[in-house]
Image: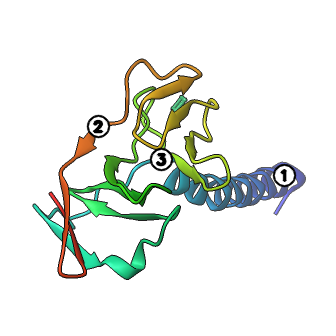
Amino acid sequence: MDARSRRKFLGLCLGGLLAGAGGAVLYPLIRYLAPRRDGSARRTVTFPAAEVPEGAAKFFEYNGKTAVVIRQKNGALVALSAVCTHLGCVVQWQKEKEEFLCPCHAGRFSAAGQVLGGPPPKPLETIPVTAANGTITVG
Ligand code: FES
């Protein structure tokens, strides 16, 4: 193997390593920021009311996208799409502030889904929610 072939071979190996390392870093980041689109679409979702205590949020899959139900400090239940209306990142619940924060561009939403600040053009989509006999039903 001459010097030129060796250099070409080493260049290919290094390129492969860099492509693998880039994929290992980018894939988890994209999965974290992008809403899920798997086959878990359901028309209604139920879970025990005890899973959503006062001030808490429960994230779940609803019709193939991430949704969230929260119980406000006044006891009211709210179910919302957790997909930001700006560019589609999944919002995070800030329990202390009782608001949602979008990690992508710092969009902020109230516990009812109304825009509080940042670039989101409209509120989070609301989803029907009921509670009866210790069970929360969304959808
Ligand atoms: S995607 Fe949420 S603020 Fe931009």
**What is the distance, in whole Å, between disc 1 and disc 3 at their CAs?**
45 Å
Q: Mark 3 or mark 1, which is nearer the start of the sequence?
A: 1
Crowding at dot 1, Cα within 10 Å, few <14 / some 14-19 / many 20+, comes out as few
Q: Mark 2 or mark 1, which is nearer the start of the sequence?
A: 1
Left or right placement of residue 114 versus residue 19 in this view: left
Q: Nearer the viewer, residue 98 or 21?
A: 98
**What is the distance, in whole Å, between disc 2 and disc 3 at their CAs?**
13 Å
Instruction: Name the secondary structure under disc 3.
Output: loop
Q: Which residue is mark 3?
A: 90
Q: Mark 3 or mark 2, which is nearer the start of the sequence?
A: 3
Residue 125, which numbered label?
2
Mark 3 vs ligand 1: CB below 8 Å: no
Label 2 close to label 3 by CB (< 8 Å) = no
Instruction: Please tell me whether mark 2 or mark 3 is closer to you in this view.
Output: 2
Q: Nearer the viewer, residue 127 or 25?
A: 127
Q: Specify the quadrant that holds the N terminus.
A: bottom right
- Three-letter amino acid code of the residue under disc 3: Val
- Three-letter amino acid code of the residue under disc 1: Arg
- Is 113 drawn above or below residue 3 in the view shown? above
Q: Specify the quadrant that holds the C terminus.
A: bottom left
Name the quadrant containing residue 113: top left
Name the quadrant containing residue 72: bottom left
Q: Which residue is mark 1?
A: 7
Mark 2 vs ligand 1: CB below 8 Å: no
Percent from the top left, x then y, of residue 5? 78, 54
Instruction: Please tell me whether mark 1 or mark 3 is closer to you in this view.
Output: 3
Indicate how the structure is coloured in the image.
Answer: rainbow
